[in-house]
Image (cartoon, rainbow, N blue to C red):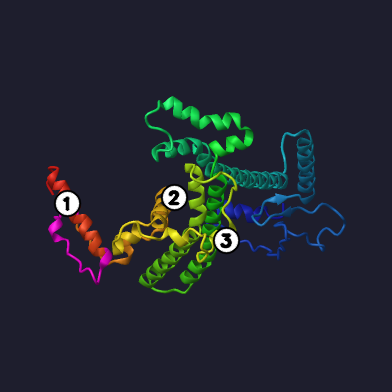
Amino acid sequence: MGRQQYLTRLGLGRSAFQEAIEEQHTTVEIAQNGHEAPNPDDHADGGYIQQYDSKGRPVNPATEARNAEMRRAQNSVLALVGVVESREHSQRESEVDLRRAKDERQALLASEDEAGSILEIVLTLVPPVLPWSIDSFIMRYQIGLYDAGQPFAYCLRTFWTPALAGGLQGAYCALLAGGAASTLHAVVRAASDLAVDVIAHPIRGAMLRQGWRRKTLRRLGLVLQCWEVAVLRCVDVLLLPVHYWSMAQQLGLAPAFPLLPPARSLLPWHPSSFHAFGWEPLVNLRFVGVLSSPAALLLFYILAVDFRSNLDLPIASKATEVQYTGANDTDLLVDRQALPRQPLAWLLYQTYYVRAILLRWCGWEL
């Protein structure tokens, strides 16, 4: 072997007493595969040429190529019978499975959203309809439409007789009177609420993109919230004739047909409109009279029944500069706010002070 002397010296070293033997250093070219490239000048007679890798180990490229071909053939046979699989195939299958799982998840979320929307609509429409007849009977009994001296069974039979003997029209007049007007009122309110949200959402986004200070954003948000509440309350005021017609039919004070009030009654300036007589005070007082008018009482009733009314009203603490006391402080540390400057803070102080008095009267140590 031509490199035996070189390898022996690398492995054992050379003794200091051994004569130095001049070696013939030849330039060794390394091929791209890490093997020593053969020299075409050596063994020109066509004999075998031993090749070495970069670390001096003998190699045979033909044998390595044949072994690689054998391994590929074996892997192909194993992949054909399903024992092993190629890395590209496994990665491709994993990507397909991941995409399929993602599509199934998106389809499931879409179906859940659709089912949730349907359930929300059903839960919005069904609960008011189911107890409608019971509420109608209770309200008619409370206003004295039935004789209180008669037994309850007699009053209930009087209420159900038109529904059982009058056919479909009689059933509607007895059980669902005012339901059509109430449904129209609810649909218009929901549509107006949706329209206000659609208009206010881009405005909020534009305000956040301006980069204003937090205090400025809070004030503008409060103004926008007050605008939303004002628009919704104006819609409630305009729909008062529809709600009045619905309640009159439910109480039995108005005929069940026609289902909806005349269109001219929705005009506030029309003589037959509810606004023409609904705002007349029931008490001859300046401020209390306006609040005790039928229209105001009906509007308060709408706000009380609406479970979202507390979310529509702005939070009073955002419009005031109130410093709350700590957990261990007494109520005496709360500063009394002036009425002209801070009306909401003055109201909060009064309610807090009344609550403290009631708690002391009940025996609590504050």
Question: Which residue is identified by label 3?
Answer: 264
Q: SS of the residue at dot 1?
A: helix
Report the front residue among 178 and 335.
Answer: 178
Query: In the image, 365: left or right of 196?
Result: left
Binning the other alpha carbons within 10 Å of mark 2 as few (below 14), some (14 to 19) or many (20 upward) gives few
Query: In front of the other: label 1 or label 2?
Result: 2
Label disc, if present, on residue 306 of the rendered structure: 2
Disc 2 from disc 3: Cα separation? 27 Å
What amino acid type is highlighted by mark number 2?
A: Asp
**Residue 159 in sight here:** yes
The numbered mark, 2 or 3, whose residue comes first in the sequence reads 3
Q: Please give the name of the residue rendered at 47% of the width and 64% of the height, measured from the top-left corner.
A: 231
Q: SS of the residue at dot 3?
A: helix
Q: Main secondary structure of the magenta part?
A: loop
The numbered mark, 1 or 2, whose residue comes first in the sequence reads 2
Disc 1 from disc 2: Cα separation? 30 Å
Query: Which residue occupies the extreme right position in the image?
Result: 45
Report the front residue among 338 and 292.
Answer: 292
Label disc, if present, on residue 356 of the rendered structure: 1
Q: Please give the name of the residue rendered at 67% of the width and 43% of the height, measured from the top-left corner.
A: 97
Read off the magenta span.
327-344
The numbered mark, 1 or 3, whose residue comes first in the sequence reads 3
What amino acid type is highlighted by mark number 1?
A: Ala
Q: SS of the residue at dot 2?
A: loop
Q: Cβ–Cβ below 8 Å for labels 1 and 2?
A: no
Where residue 242 sits: x, y (%)?
52, 54
What amino acid type is highlighted by mark number 3?
A: Arg
Residue 41 to residue 50: above or below: below
